[in-house]
Image: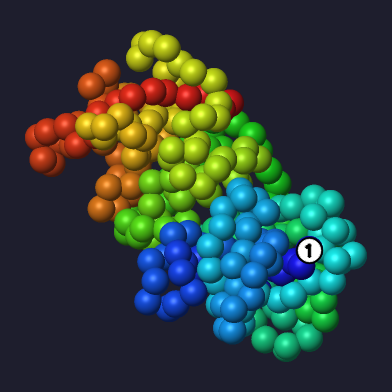
Amino acid sequence: MKFGITNVSIMPMRAAPDDRSEMISQTLFGEILEIEEVRKNWSLVRCLYDDYRGWVDTKQYYPLEDDEAAKLMDSHVFYSKETVSTIYNISGKREQRIVFGSHFPGYSNGKIRFGKNEFIVKENPLTLKIVKSVDSVLEMARKFMDAPYLWGGKTPFGVDCSGFTQSVFKTCGIKLKRDASQQVHQGENIDFIGDILPGDLAFFDDKEGRIIHVGIIFPNNKIMHASGKIRLDILDHNGIFNEEKGDYTHKLRIVKRFL
């Protein structure tokens, strides 16, 4: 097997090996990849965090030797919790901006290293601590408020519904799959609307019964989700009610608990 690690802030993952192809997801700085195929300037990769596959620009990841890849995969991983953080590339003598949800595999004493690259993480190490709690989920979710909707996006600068939930829960130590249709098979079922709690995930289906949307439940019968942008709307047994439109926009299918 061949492996690589994302060494740019945000790397688009596309459906086909072409810059004009649909972006189906993104990998962020520090995410480890399995390289399944290389075709000229493009690589078909599997993101080890969630098993998602897609094509990426070969210039946007750093190849790893097998022993180094194994060491990084076995190491503890921290995640950036700031909208934008700064790392300093010691070998390249330059600063680099990274975004919320970036990976710091093998982080130790304020530094990370892969290959010939060594980085100083300038984010306060105290903020890297992973806290698995409802309060932490809601706090991380609020960092995305008003972020624009972007199909395939996973960051506060552009995000889709399941990219939002995955990124938020990741920084709280809970691993979710990439798509809403995959996330719905995780967690514990909540059978009655009266039993839902903040931090639960609500899933919504289309007319054919396919899961197409997900959001994070907030206090006071609210839900934070991606619809044009990350927003707070009303949630009841029917689904999401948008007060601005005066209508329901999504039909509730099921609620899952992860905490």
Q: Residue at x 25, y 29 (%)?
A: 251
Q: Nearer the viewer, residue 123 or 8?
A: 8
User: Quarter of the image holding residue 108?
Assistant: bottom right
Give coordinates of residue 29: x percent, y percent. 62, 67
Q: Residue at x 13, y 41 (%)?
A: 244
Q: Nearer the viewer, residue 230 or 40?
A: 40
- Please identify the residue farthest to the bottom as the structure is shown: 93
* Above or below for 15 versus 163: below
Give coordinates of residue 247: x percent, y percent. 12, 33
Tag 1 residue: 1
Q: Residue at x 51, y 47 (%)?
A: 178
Q: Quadrant of the N terminus?
A: bottom right
In the figure, is residue 110 to the left or right of 248? Answer: right
In the figure, is residue 202 to the left or right of 30? Answer: left
In the rendered image, is residue 29 in sight? Answer: no
* Above or below for 258 versus 231: above
Q: Quadrant of the C terminus?
A: top right
In the figure, is residue 20 to the left or right of 249? Answer: right
- Please identify the residue farthest to the left as the structure is shown: 246
Give coordinates of residue 116: x percent, y percent. 82, 81
User: Quarter of the image holding residue 218?
Assistant: top left
SS type, badge 1:
loop
